[in-house]
Amino acid sequence: MDPLIKLQVLDLIKPIHIPLDWLETNQAHIFKSNLPGLQKEDVKVQLEGGVMRISGEFKKDEVGINDKWRCLERPHGPFSRRFRVPENVMLDQMDADMTNGVLTLTIPKVAETKLNVRLIDISEN
């Protein structure tokens, strides 16, 4: 079997994994994913029922009719990544940015409400 054909068959079996970093600060949850070669138009971000989904497709370079790929290691094909969004966030204020192939999702946290503590005097009977 041609090594290239074997490589393509493995791609069909194994989905494309897109790595995801998650940083929690005092103000927000920040998610970053490297999507090299993609533009913002190539990526879809959806939120449904507290689950975030990042999807898109890495396209294979076009080659001439007589050209043959000898090695094809960069990912190509559709991808999808899902994760549950934390509960302490303001989803209506979420920001998405795509710069130099890095998708950054910033979701501000809900401001913590501090309990008012009041000292109660105890009277004597």
Image (tube, rainbow, N blue to C red):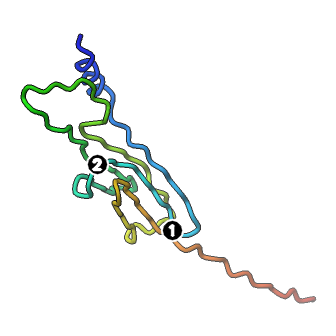
Residue occupying the point 37% across, 56% down = 103
Pointer 2: what residue? 37
Q: Amino acid at mark 2?
A: Gly
**Residue plotted at (33% across, 50% down):** 54
How far across and down, in percent of the image, does residue 101 sit? 34, 53
Disc 1, SS: loop
- State whether residue 82 is above or below residue 124: above
- From the viewer's perspective, tell me whether residue 12 is left or right of residue 112: left
Confirm or deny contact between disc 2 and disc 1 (CB under 8 A): no
- List x then y, in percent, for residue 67: 13, 27
The residue where tag 1 is placed is 109
Give the quarter of the figure containing the N terminus. top left
Q: Position of residue 15 (x, y in %)?
A: 32, 33
- Residues under labels 2 and 1: Cα distance? 31 Å
**If you read the primary sequence from the N terminus, does the residue marked by circle 2 or circle 1 appear first?**
2
Residue located 47% across and 65% down the image: 89
Question: Looking at the image, is 122 positioned above or below residue 55?
Answer: below
Image-based side of 36 in relation to 114, left or right: left
Q: Which mark is residue 62?
A: none
Residue under the image location 31 percent in, 35 percent down: 74
Q: Mark 2, mark 1: which one is toward the viewer?
A: 2
Q: Nearer the viewer, residue 119 or 13?
A: 13
Residue furthest to the right: 124
What is the total number of numbered labels drawn onto the structure image?
2
**Relative to the observer, which residue lies in front, 85 or 25?**
25
Q: Amino acid at mark 1?
A: Lys
Q: Which x, y percent locates residue 35?
A: 34, 48
In terms of image quadrants, where is residue 116? bottom right
